[in-house]
Amino acid sequence: MFEKFSEILTNRHEYARDWKKRTGGKVVGFFCSYAPEEPLKAAGILPVRIIGGHKSSDKVGKYIAPNIGCSFCRDALGRGLEGDYDYLDGIVQGQTCLHTGEAFWVWQKHLPVKFSYFLAVPHSTQTIGREEYLAVEYAKFKTALEKWIGKEITNEDLDRGIESYNTNRQLIRQIFEFRQQDNPLVTGSEALDLALSGQIMDRDEHNAMMKEVLKKLPDRKMDRDPGTRIMIIGSVNTDREFMHMVEHECDLPATIVIDDTCTGIRYNFNDVNPQEDRLMAISLRYNHRPPCPNKDWPRRRRIPFIKHLIKTYKVDAVILFNHKFCQPHQLDNAVIEREMKAMGIPTLTLEFDIRIPIGQFRTRVEAMLETTMDII
Amino acid sequence: MSKYKTEPMKLWKRIKEFKQNHFKEYHEAHKNGRLRFLGATALSISQYTGFENAVIMGSEPFAANIAFWKDFGLKCMEECERRGMTRELCGYSKCVWGAQFLNKNIMPDGTMLSEWGKPDFASSFSLAPCHCKWFQILCENSDTPMYLFDLTKAYPYNDENLIKYMTGQMLDCIEQAEKAVGQPFIDELFIKGVKNEFKSYRTWCDIMILNQTIPAPLDEKTIFSFIVPNLTKAYGDDTVALMQELKEEVQDRVNRGIAAVANEQFRIITDAIPPWPALELYRYLEREYGGVVVGSPYVICLCGSWKFENDKGDLIPTPTPVELGMPLTTREEVARALVWYRSHFSTETPYNIACGEVLHELTLKIAKQWHADGGMLHQNIGCTMQALGSMESRNAVAEAGIPCMNYEGNDADSREIDLTNMKRKFDIFFEANNVKRLTKKAA
Ligand code: SF4
Ligand code: SF4
């Protein structure tokens, strides 16, 4: 049912090249999910999330030290330096963490594209004046885009962009809801491919595919034991090998029923509420979406969000998914672990590098599953 | 016979005493019926001068002092790690969290304190998000009221949207602080404090410019001691006077050709916060190679405010709002002027990731303007913000024809500092650049 999403994700570069050929449009890569995609879509541009390929590249070390830069960014930058993203016409960074920022600057300097833009998204999504501030930054971004594409982006264009993305997020949430069932109708691996393929596809095409899935999904029969219901908490998850291992290769059954990651529900949780000032409407969405740790201060909005997901998706155990040298998530993890412990939820922290020691991870996941299955 | 005349800095002792007294004032504030404010220095701590009985401490010098006393620093790190904070996390944060967990602290002269120094109000700026996460954790654990500022970017400067946003936050912070400490904020005191900060910062720029002279009147290790007044008390009349005296003394050294390092033969720029637990490496460079560290984006910008001349040219001091005749009579005007002034290249703003575009350019400008023969950039893995851009700064300097290397270290965690390896790297670098060793190498 989800094979097509997986196939496009696997062949994402071919998809983007083909999209360009089919539409004659421009493709812009973005590093972090805080880059506003709606104005890009409104400008007729295909935004694609720049992700790694789980392959190391010896070209990165000249720019970012391997003992400092997070594994996700080193991998993504490596793919750029190796030429995988040679079809990009532009790049955009919506400011979040230091690592994506540095990857952006290195890319801008060493892989020149026709358009590059660093959008100074507020670090905090709680400060006074941040919504107005971001709306003004969007206006500057829109002006820069208009200059580049040589035409005005009208309110009607923005409405189209907003509508396409709102629909996309709503459909993803609808499909994710089937994971709340006692025997979830969508596995975690499928959910990842579904959501992640959206971040590299034309959303209208992605929407059409999801609508087809939704026609058949309620009648789907799952002939697998769901086992332990796991939640993944972390940054950006593109590790399909790991997801597959947890759900299909462990000696004990398990299903990843939900996540708090920016390639999953965190990114798709809320919509743009239409209002006359379109850029303000978009600003409100990005400011009010469930935050990543970088943006979660002074109050902690993440913890209640995680607790809400645990309850709704009946989570038995948590995996803290941490990219190597990802300090932002490390900063929150000690607090999350404490909260999980108080709730009696077993928690396993795993550190992901560009390549992962899958055998070792399997052993550790199985050890956690043993505790939740009550067999020891 | 030495190449240049040298002599100790006359102000050395007084500046050391200044630091000791300020720390004492902070720690004894409650005993003396005063309030403690702990704030990141990234955009300013002078906003608290409006509270009549405030003692204000900059959180970075507070952390650096712990890091410098490496045994205590190590205890702080270990205490954090025991509580689930990983080894990779920020060194400064772990110094202060650790002090808090242990409820102990240390004075600049090494005297141990039986209390860590919980503030009555704390604030930080998101130079990088972690700079605010640092305070989030600190304040949660100590139940301290906090205000965390969102400093989204500092380049391009003069950005009205940013100035408006930051000014709004500063005014809000003042109101929140008033409520939290239950004391009135006096605008006249605030205006005076901020005007003093402009003077202290402007004087710092002049002092740094004097260090472009050959031979350099100051070396960076000495400069580290001189940054404290501006970082902890730029708003004070005593700091304004002290900075003026310092400038006069440095000017006098320049006039008389007094060098910081008698055998100066290779001028070096560095990059980031130094490895505080291993400052002896500076003396190694001087003694063995006549290598004098003349500055860095860190030390030059830390206590001053700079900009590029006509947006492309040399690094020059930002004219102060007073020099520019900006209106400075109301709280709003002063807050705005302060934000405007400090959101240039000031404190650590060039390391703000939104400035990645210019950090390397800035480093190169410093190398050229301070007449560096080479760069030895500290890849400070204790601070991700600084470490991430370090390699590209090295590339920029090296590509411009100035030999440049990175060396790995840590501003706070002595376990991550391999002094032997550092020295070996320096030896190779000097050898490769035909710099004569001044001493016989130990067998
Ligand atoms: S949040 Fe973490 S994993 Fe994601 S890009 Fe930043 S450092 Fe890397
Ligand atoms: S890592 Fe650097 S920027 Fe981050 S909190 Fe520590 S000192 Fe601040």
Image (spheres, coloured by chain):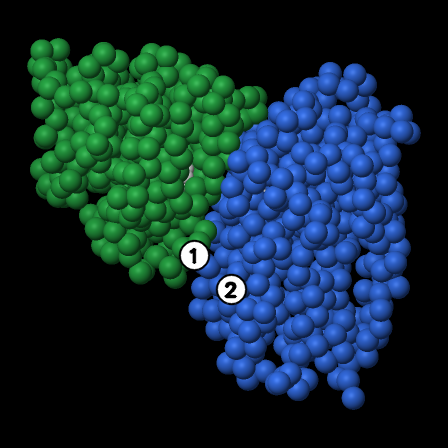
Chain colours: A green, B blue
Decide: is A321 above or below B350: above
Name the residue carrying label 1: A65
Q: Which mark is residue A358?
A: none
Q: Position of residue B411 (x, y in %)?
A: 61, 53
Q: Report crowding for label 1: few under 14, some 14 to 19, many 20 or more residues within 10 A (C-alpha).
A: many
**In the displayed image of the protein, which residue is found farthest to the front?**
A376
Residue at point 88% right, 58% down? B13
Q: Amino acid at mark 2?
A: Asn
Q: Which residue is mark 2?
A: B406
| Contact (Cβ within 8 Å) of mark 1 with mark 2 | yes
Under tag 2, what secondary structure? strand
Q: Quadrant of ligand 1?
A: top left
Using residue B227 as the reference point, say whether residue B314 is left or right of it.
Answer: left
- Which residue sits at x=47%, y=23%? A341
Q: Is residue A302 visible?
A: no
Total numbered circles:
2
Between marks 1 and 2, how big is the CA–CA gap?
10 Å
Which residue is at a point 62% across and 44% down the rendered structure image? B77
As rendered, which of A19 and A369 lies closer to the eye? Answer: A369
Label 2 crowd (10 A; few <14 / some 14-19 / many >=20): many
**Residue at image coords 62%, 40%:** B79
The chain carrying label 1 is: A
Screen quadrant of the C terminus of chain A = top left
Residue B265: which quarter of the image?
bottom right
Q: Tell me the amino acid under the disc marked 1.
A: Ala
